[in-house]
Image (cartoon, helix red, strand yellow):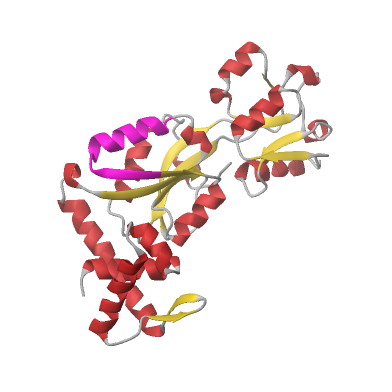
Amino acid sequence: MNLRQLETFYWAAKLGSFSAAADRLNATQSTVSMRIQDLERDFGRTLFDRGRRGARITAMGRELMRYAEEVLRLSAEVRERLASSATMPGVLRIGVVEMISVTWLPRLVKAIHETYPKLALELDEALTQNLVEDLNQGNLDLILAAGRTPGYNFNQVSLGAVEFAWMASPSLSLPKRRLGPRDLQHWPVIALSRESYHHRSIEEWFRSGGAHCRRIDTCKSLGVAAALAGAGLGVTLLPPRCYRNELKAGRLQVITVAPRFRPVEFTATCSVATIQPLARRISELAGEVSDFDKVPAKRKQKRNGM
């Protein structure tokens, strides 16, 4: 038995298939099968039931999984503490939301490569809920997303907060006064997908005023939402810092509303039990690189998100 065999077993069990483990380890499926067969030969026990529906972990496999996770975590901790950053190899899978992609992600990537020149990155942009699911399933090592992921099995670093505001094209001729949910419910709303913080926050804002918007069009990008709003097709919720040019050119305008939206906190999140030695270090580096507004200590205890 060796670490490579244990790591292969761990990912096959975690991801639920040999093919997924092969992709995760950048190996062939035959290599994964061979390593697991060698491990089974060492123990003299079957770790997976192989059938038409794929490989399902056995009771013996579940017992080994507890030890494999601990061994790999300790191995990662040793590497993290003792290895030079310049010699740390490997692949780090990072999931990010659009808000970070269009602001300081390039600076983070540059800082990572300067500190860990042998580390390869795999970046995936998606909505927060999808990123959390991928983190839980082991498809990602680290996520940079909106809000704080509930639970005690996560290591989370605050990346700061961002102000969001209602915006629309001047061509909509909205009333020149402070507007509430009952006022805005009469205009079409443009939001991100239903599973996003963006969509849920918009719905909660309308409900807080006893209102219900007559129509919500959805998309998967703040950029698309801004373009649609700029064309006069509805009102949307956007971060003013990212749309200064549109505001200055008069394509968009900020709508004065009550109640206002609270700033949205973003966090770097990885599993406490991660076997990736650099996930926590990169989380801290992301916190240093981020140029979002710092969050007061008391607010960090509250769940917030977009």
Image x and y of residue 137, in percent: 46, 61
Magenta run includes residue 117: yes
Please identify the residue farthest to the top as the structure is shown: 249
Does 200 sit left or right of 289 as displayed? right
User: Height in image: 225 above or below 32?
Assistant: above
At horizontal 42% and vertical 29% (from top left) the residue drawn is 291
Q: Quadrant of the N terminus?
A: bottom left
Does 143 sit left or right of 212 as displayed? left
At horizontal 56% and vertical 34% (from top left) the residue drawn is 263
Residue 205 sits in which quadrant?
Answer: top right
User: Height in image: 5 above or below 234?
Assistant: below
Please identify the residue farthest to the bottom as the structure is shown: 44
Residue numbers of the magenta segment: 104-122
- Residue 155 in sight in this render: no
Q: How many marks?
A: 0
Residue 225 sits in which quadrant?
Answer: top right
- Residue 250 in sight in this render: yes
Q: Quadrant of the C terminus?
A: top right
At horizontal 60% and vertical 33% (from top left) the residue drawn is 222
Magenta run includes residue 301: no
Image x and y of residue 247, in percent: 62, 17
Does 237 sit left or right of 29 as displayed? right
Image x and y of residue 274, in percent: 34, 59
Image x and y of residue 4, in percent: 24, 66
Which one is in front, 295 or 124? Answer: 124
